[in-house]
Image: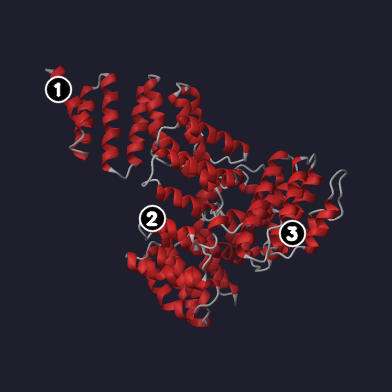
């Protein structure tokens, strides 16, 4: 959380201008049409309502009118006019809860219209703006959209904005991530006019994977008064050694006394895996900080505390300061017994507005009730918040776990209707069609899932085994086992490896795999019986 909020600042320093983001956002607002009033679209009355809106109450009438217009948008000009009003609403909100909701809505509508009119680069720029505005991590479907941008959409006007979004998404924080983007070279070319030459050379070398060259150029910047040492520290943080970056940030703090450098030192230690060092800095700074930095430090300390009593103390302090901090409320509730947690969550002043808090009550109630009420509560919540991608994650996992594939199918249809294209949902769709015997379709869906999780190769291995591609099945069972962090699961996977070797007639390999499965879990009865049967057949 702390690193995410500072990553954009670090990148802007590399660009050499702390004003880039503000200028870009202003540019986007200017680019949205102000005088367009397409035929049949009454934006004038909406603009009058926007002027009189107080920014405190939910603008239900405005949203209803915008929603009606959205349903009948027929070209990108209308779409841009509509999105300007959504953005104005988000900017005009005067409470954090309302601002978050309206910014998410701006993001949702802009993404939907971009998909409806994919040929318009103007809408692409607005989508990037909405990604930067939302005060949260980007979702998996948003990350997928960023990974598959067409190079022709990138130009000198949106290149810097795109780079800022990529940095927020952690897709431009190391050469490996950046090299996966097919449009990377085009982006760097279009970015060049916006970036001071020395900083551009450092950035281009780092993103191309030439870290030594980037550090050499960065060291030359170290002698430049002001930003030079800071650029080098940020370069080391993102592309080199975060522990060395921590030392540089400490030197900057010692020479200039700015607390922000001390916080970046802590972030660097955290990235380097030195949690205790980061924690010590946060604890020492707590009394000297003010504003949002206090909340960030308390949240980090609470999340990484080693005891429940320490977690409770930190989250209590944070909630005394920010009683509507969604994630602090959630974390504090998990320190309570199930029924106490449910009562605590429901008493929160933001409970009715936050889907995640309501989902937590359903999760905690699961252990108290049968499947029926949990499923009913889940559907009620999904119908209230049909565009909250986080709900679909847990709902899909839960419905598949209890074996309710009919309801899971309904959930996947609902996700598609609401433009939720999370790759994780593709996984559950693959599992359903796999159970229905549509193995080719299941294989294609699983192969398209990009996250490294053991159940992807494990289920692909099942398909290969059932379609008599036994050698490939062995390879993927072994891959799944290498991703397992549980000896019981790994034992089951090596049992499957052994079964495949039996099919191939490779009895010595099968024996070794059964024995390894039993070494991982001596109580694996089916592996023990299979090994005994193999030994009897060999006599």
Mark 3 Cα within 10 Å, few/some/many (few <14, many 20+)?
Answer: some
Give the mark nearest the N terminus, 3 or 1.
3
In this rendering, the label closer to the viewer, 3 or 1: 3
Location of residue 434 in the rendering, given as x and y in whole percent from the top left corner: 45, 26
In this rendering, the label closer to the viewer, 1 or 2: 2
The Cα atoms of the two marked residues, 1 and 2, are separated by 54 Å
Give the mark nearest the N terminus, 1 or 2.
2
Q: Which residue is mark 3?
A: 88
Q: Secondary structure at mark 3?
A: helix
Q: Secondary structure at mark 2?
A: helix
Q: Residue at x 27, y 33 (%)?
A: 494
Q: Secondary structure at mark 1?
A: helix
Q: Which residue is mark 2?
A: 339
Q: Between residues 254 and 69, which one lies in front from this camera angle? A: 69
Q: Within the image, what quadrant is residue 305 found in?
A: bottom left
Q: Residue at x 29, y 29 (%)?
A: 497
The residue furthest left is 539
Q: Which residue is mark 1?
A: 535
Q: Within the image, what quadrant is residue 103 found in?
A: bottom right
The Cα atoms of the two marked residues, 2 and 3, are separated by 41 Å
Using the image, determine if residue 459 lies above or below residue 376: above
Q: Between residues 61 and 495, which one lies in front from this camera angle? A: 61
């Amino acid at each position: 959380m702390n690193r995410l909020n500072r990553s954009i600042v670090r990148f802007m320093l590399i660009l050499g201008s702390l004003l880039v983001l503000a200028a870009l956002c202003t540019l986007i607002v200017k680019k949205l049409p102000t005088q367009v009033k397409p035929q049949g679209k009454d934006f004038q009355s909406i603009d009058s309502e926007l002027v009189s809106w107080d920014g405190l109450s939910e603008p239900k009438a405005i949203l209803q009118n915008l929603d009606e217009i959205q349903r009948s948008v027929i070209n990108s000009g209308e779409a841009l006019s509509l999105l300007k009003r959504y953005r104005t609403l988000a900017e005009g909100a005067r409470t954090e809860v309302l601002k978050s909701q309206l910014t998410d809505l701006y993001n949702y509508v802009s993404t939907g219209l971009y998909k409806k009119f994919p040929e318009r680069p103007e809408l692409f720029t607005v989508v990037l703006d909405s990604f930067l505005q939302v005060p949260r991590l980007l979702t998996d479907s948003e990350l997928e959209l960023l990974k598959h941008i067409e190079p022709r959409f990138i130009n000198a006007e949106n290149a810097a904005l795109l780079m800022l979004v990529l940095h927020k998404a952690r897709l431009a924080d190391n050469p490996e991530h950046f090299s996966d983007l097919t449009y990377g070279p085009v982006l760097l070319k279009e970015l060049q006019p916006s970036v001071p030459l020395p900083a551009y050379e450092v950035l281009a070398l780092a993103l191309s994977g030439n870290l030594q060259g980037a550090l050499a150029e960065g060291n030359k910047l170290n002698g430049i008064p002001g930003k030079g040492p800071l650029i080098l520290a940020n370069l080391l943080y993102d592309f080199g050694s975060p522990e060395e970056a921590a030392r540089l940030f400490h030197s900057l703090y010692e020479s200039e006394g700015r607390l922000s450098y001390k916080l970046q030192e802590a972030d660097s230690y955290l990235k380097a895996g030195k949690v205790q060092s980061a924690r010590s800095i946060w604890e020492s700074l707590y009394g000297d900080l003010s504003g949002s930095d206090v909340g960030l430090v308390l949240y980090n300390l609470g999340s990484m505390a080693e005891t429940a009593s320490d977690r409770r103390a930190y989250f209590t302090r944070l909630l005394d300061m920010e009683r509507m901090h969604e994630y602090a409320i959630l974390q504090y509730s998990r320190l309570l017994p199930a029924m106490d947690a449910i009562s605590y969550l429901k008493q929160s002043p933001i409970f009715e507005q936050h889907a995640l808090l309501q989902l937590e009550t359903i999760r905690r109630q699961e252990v108290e009730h049968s499947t029926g009420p949990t499923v009913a509560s889940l559907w009620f919540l999904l119908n209230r918040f049909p565009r909250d991608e986080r709900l679909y994650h847990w709902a899909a996992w839960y419905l598949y776990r209890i074996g309710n594939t009919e309801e899971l199918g309904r959930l996947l249809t609902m996700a598609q209707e609401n433009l939720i294209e999370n790759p994780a949902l593709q996984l559950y769709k693959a599992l359903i069609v796999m159970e229905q015997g549509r193995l080719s379709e299941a294989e294609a869906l699983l192969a398209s899932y990009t996250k490294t999780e053991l159940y992807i190769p494990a289920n692909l291995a099942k398909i290969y085994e059932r379609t008599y591609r036994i050698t490939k099945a062995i390879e993927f069972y072994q891959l799944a086992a290498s991703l397992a962090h549980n000896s019981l699961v790994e034992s089951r996977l090596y049992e499957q490896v052994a079964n495949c070797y039996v099919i191939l007639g490779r009895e010595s390999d099968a024996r070794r795999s059964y024995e390894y499965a039993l070494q991982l879990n001596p109580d694996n009865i089916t592996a023990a019986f299979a090994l005994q049967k193999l030994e009897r057949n060999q006599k």
